[in-house]
Amino acid sequence: MTQNQNLAALSAAGVSVWLDDLSRSLLQSGTLQHLIDTRSVVGVTTNPSTFERALTDGRAYDGQIAELTARGTDIDTAIRTVITDDVRAACDVLRPQWTASDGVDGRVSIEVDPRLAHNTDQTATQAVELAKIVDRPNVLIKIPATAAGLPAITAVVAKGVSVNVTLIFSAQRHRAVMNAYLAGLEAAQHAGLDLSQIHSVASLFVSRVDTEVDKRLEMIGTSEALALRAQAGIANARLAYSAYQQAFEAGRRYAALRNAGARAQRPLWASTGVKNPAYPDTMYVTELIAPNTVSTMPEKTLEAVADHGAITGDTISGTAGQAQALFDHLRDVGIDVRDAFAALENDGVAKFAASWRQSRRHWPSDSRTERH
């Protein structure tokens, strides 16, 4: 099959195209394979919200839910079984892309229970457990970039587990995430592990930043404030890419690890679906093109890029100064960006936890024994 020219151009510019969705129907219908064959898709990300939506779509899970219930499986174990089965199957579908890219792509992400986001030890323990349950070399375990998540990242990477660090909302937190990853690599090297087998991406959320900052700009309401809407998300990601370049392209700490076979932690642009219909529906993809990045898109955004995305080459490198000026301007009009980022993190964790709880309603009431 022929790849769509826009998405092929995006890939040629150094951006790995990953699908931000997974469901059993997507697997069983052959849709995932079709997107691989025609839309340059080389990876998949999931989160509790995408999984909760999958459970509401059709009856693909009814048989397994009935079987697990009949066996007396508690609901948290049952949910984990259903999720890991889908992720394992997706890993198998993407195994050729994993092989062809020497492990860089062909990746499928699965998230730790979001209710553990503020518990370091339980997050690390479950991350290792999930890697063992999925039992595929191309799985990435998603760990939130909360204060408690940072040491969990180090602990998990130190054991050789590849991670997707999620819910990153600021360039400052992104730097802490990169440091946590590097510390994990150093511990893994000390333990004698093969660093070339450890991979990671750092997921920067984009459109959610604009949603929060735009809301605050509109509350201020001045013409100067309103003129800054729809800019913070992209500027924030561009600052994060500059931090990535400093840490992994020019950083001495990583250089020593690279000589031992370590891989850089690539920036991943998450939340690329446009929340405000007044904005161009491809803006969070076409304005964030640079080498060694990942763009993970819901299918609607993927198809928009395929249809009319303007791929013009690198749109990030050299933009850090302009991006910082934008944040300086936000501060000058009265935006407390640190407070905005904190609110986004708290809201992100809460939404994922709510989606996990919503998933429980698909099980019979007599099986709803909750375990953490």
Image (spheres, grey):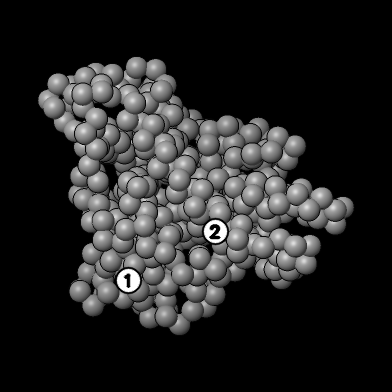
Q: Residue 323: give its label.
A: none
Query: Foreground residue, 214 or 55?
Result: 214
Whole-angstrom CA distance, mark 1 to mark 2, is: 28 Å
User: Pointer 2: residues within 10 angstroms few (<14), some, or many (20+)?
Assistant: some
Query: Foreground residue, 33 or 165?
Result: 165
Identify the residue at horizontal 59%, vertical 69% (top origin).
Answer: 242
Residue 315 at least partly seen:
no
Residue 123 at least partly seen:
yes
- Report helix, strand or loop for mark 2: helix
Q: Is residue 371 left or right of residue 117?
A: left
Q: Earlier in the sequence, mark 1 or mark 2?
A: 1
Q: How many marks?
A: 2
Residue 220's place in the image compared with 244, above or below, is above
> Mark 1 sits on what residue?
185
Residue that extends furthest to the right in the rendered view of this protein: 223
Identify the residue at horizontal 55%, vertical 52% (top origin).
Answer: 344
- Residue 361 figure quarter: top left
User: Pointer 1: residues within 10 angstroms few (<14), some, or many (20+)?
Assistant: many
- Residue 44 figure quarter: top left
Residue type of the residue flagged with mark 1: Leu
Identify the residue at horizontal 64%, vertical 40% (top origin).
Answer: 274
Q: Is residue 348 left or right of residue 282?
A: left
> Mark 2 sits on what residue?
342
